[in-house]
Image (spheres, rainbow, N blue to C red):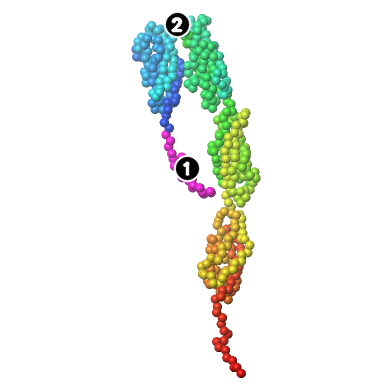
Amino acid sequence: MVVATDGGKYDARSQKVPVQIIIDDVNDNKPVFEKYPFKGHVAALVQPGQTLLQVSATDEDQGTNGEIVYSLINDSTNGKFRINPNTGSLSATQSLASENGKLLHLEVIARDKGNPPQTAIGLIELQVGDIPPGTPHLRFQNDTYVVRLPENGVSGQSVVQLNAVRSDGRRQRIIYSIGSGNEDGAFTIDAATDEIKIHNADRLDFERYPKGLKLIAVARTEGNPVLYGYCEVRVLLVDENDNAPRFTQHQYSAAVWEGNNKGTFVMQVSAYDADQGSNSRILYHIVDGNHDNAFIIEPAFSGIVKTNIVLDREIRDMYRLKVIATDEGVPQMTGTTTIQVHIVDVNDNQPTFPPHSIISVSEGIELGTVLTSITANDVDTNPALTYTFVDEASDPDATSIFAIDRFSGKVILRQRLDYETRQEYQLKISASDTSHLAQTTLTIRVTDQNDNAPIFQQPAYHTILP
């Protein structure tokens, strides 16, 4: 989901649109056999074509990359068995009478249809008829080995020493291998000394294998007959503090009203840590940008951000807080994010006018002229100020001669001035933000213009001269 948001500070508008991202599969997973080995017990007199057992493997890839084809390899039975390439069903092609009393081992390969293909080799152990008493067999000293291994081990580090022997005590060269569970190549086994070591330490990640890994080790004798033995090696990875906490967002944004009580909820941040136990327990702290100690995270493990003072937007309108998430591992690891907290304005301040204004205007000025602009100051951002004349009834002549623009505070001449009629006007003006009022007085002095010719007191004068 992609969100487009405009630049509105407190009333931003946004639109969402879904975006579908299709990821093409790459053949990066090998088939994995569900068992190792697959064991079966059949009678010697089986009918050709009769299903003896079925092998199965899975592949995490999709499409043809996950389709599997089965085949037998290194067949030492001269073609007495076949496997269905699509279903993995094993059947006999002829009578098994000549194999009666034997334990047969068949190697099967699972190959996917990717390009290039990925493969895995499995094993089928098939008992034909009954094994005669006293037949020697090969076995490990322990059926199951359990080892604990730090997840940050190093390549070449010893994991466990195995040992297999023949049940009859006969000494015979034994070759060791890892049959299954090592698809990532994390381990290697010395074929001669039977010691398992770390091969690729990067693959040992507790967060990937929280329940550990299960390996099937195989011992095989050289010579005739070939004997097989198996054991399970359970590797339990010990978690180490190798993952830092990560916040769910690189940056958070919140808004809180100024004037709210101390302890007001602002928002909750959240981080996660892929480690386990104390290595994943997280505490949150504000480490920078917290001017005046204005915010607090309480309790520290909650990520809940609260106000720690009564905020005043006229002092600071935005805080940019740096927050860290710290785990309780040794050594501690941290993650970082930022929170932008915008302080929303409340109309809690009264408008103020500058000192008393006096202007001089010539009586001959034209109608409609803007004489001056009266403006008040308000440190609040909203609402806008409006201007009006006050007590118009006390001086109706003045308010009929002059007008004031409600929003700009411009004082405009509506009627002509006459110095000979009146030389001064005092206009009382108010500014309102809907909650508070401020008043001032504008004095307008009319200056004389030579707009009158002299007038004799008498139309004619008479005198008698001696």
Q: Is residue 365 above or below residue 199?
A: below
> Residue 450: percent from the left, percent from the top?
56, 75
Q: Residue furthest bottom?
A: 466
User: How crowded is the residue under tag 1: few (<14 C-alpha within 10 Å), some, or many (20+)?
Assistant: few
Q: Main secondary structure of the magenta part?
A: loop
Q: Secondary structure at mark 1?
A: strand
> Residue 16: percent from the left, percent from the top?
46, 43
Residue 312 in view here: no
Residue type at mark 1 is Val
Residue type at mark 2 is Asn
Could you tell me which residue is drawn at 51 percent across and 11 percent down? 192
* Foreground residue among 144 and 338: 338
Is 16 placed left or right of 347 in the picture?
left
Which is nearer the N-term, disc 2 or disc 1? 1
- Was residue 13 drawn as part of the magenta stretch in this picture? yes
Q: Which residues are magenta?
A: 1-22
For disc 2, the marked residue is: 224
Which mark identifies residue 3?
1
Q: Quadrant of residue 161?
A: top right
Could you tell me which residue is drawn at 53 percent across and 49 percent down? 10
Q: Is residue 113 above or below residue 130?
A: below
